[in-house]
Amino acid sequence: MAAANPTRVHLVERLETLINAYNAGAIDVQELFDRLKDFIGEMTEEEHRAAREGLTEEELALYDLLTNPEPKLTQAEEVAVKLIARQLLVKLTEAVASVDWLRSQETRGHVRYQIKQTLNNLPEAPYPDQLWNSKGSCPTAWCSLLGPPPISASV
């Protein structure tokens, strides 16, 4: 789940904290069991969030990158950002579909360009320049959501 959406890393960290607390003797088996039940409930809720938001898991991952930890959006802005997440997924998928985009400077530049062009459509009010720049500054994070680059036939 965290591999598909980097904004879910907190779930992995929370599970590790629970296990470490148990291993250190800070909580007993019953407490660990109770906390794990709560944790599983939270994971189930998170798994259903994509459907509730009307997005695929990949679109949700991009939406989360655009909205977490900020900005807070109005309902109309949420709709606009969801549309942009969908558009960005299509553009990124097309840009990296047939090449190992990490190895080619030209392709990395094209990916950056596609991200910036798509992010230009974000609502202006919740995305001041500094926040806008931070959202589009790491194409590796964006494209890592699409999985590993294709294996090249020529080695």
Image (tube, helix red, strand yellow):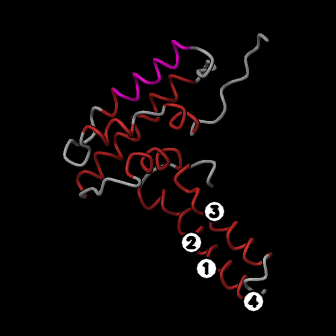
The residue labelled by disc 3 is 13
Q: Main secondary structure of the magenta part?
A: helix
- Residue 55 image position (x, y, % from top left): 45, 50
Q: Quadrant of the C terminus?
A: top right
Alpha carbon separation for disc pair 3 and 2: 14 Å
Residue at x 44% of width, y 24% of height: 112
Asked if the residue at tag 1 contacts the one at tag 2, i.e. Cβ–Cβ closer than 8 Å, the answer is: yes
In the displayed structure, 98 sits above or below 74; it is above
Q: Nearer the viewer, mark 1 or mark 3?
A: 3
Lower sequence index among marks 3 and 2: 3
> In the drawing, what numbered circle is on residue 42?
2
Instruction: Identify the element where label 2 is drawn.
Output: helix
Alpha carbon separation for disc pair 3 and 4: 21 Å
Indicate the amino acid at tag 1: Asp
Q: Is residue 108 left or right of residue 87?
A: right
- Residue 30 image position (x, y, % from top left): 75, 89
Q: Residues within 10 Å of mark 3 (few under 14, many from 20)?
A: few
The residue labelled by disc 1 is 38
Lower sequence index among marks 1 and 3: 3
Residue at x 61% of width, y 79% of height: 38
The residue labelled by disc 4 is 30
The range drawn in magenta is 105-116
Q: Residues within 10 Å of mark 4 (few under 14, many from 20)?
A: few
> In the drawing, what numbered circle is on residue 122?
none
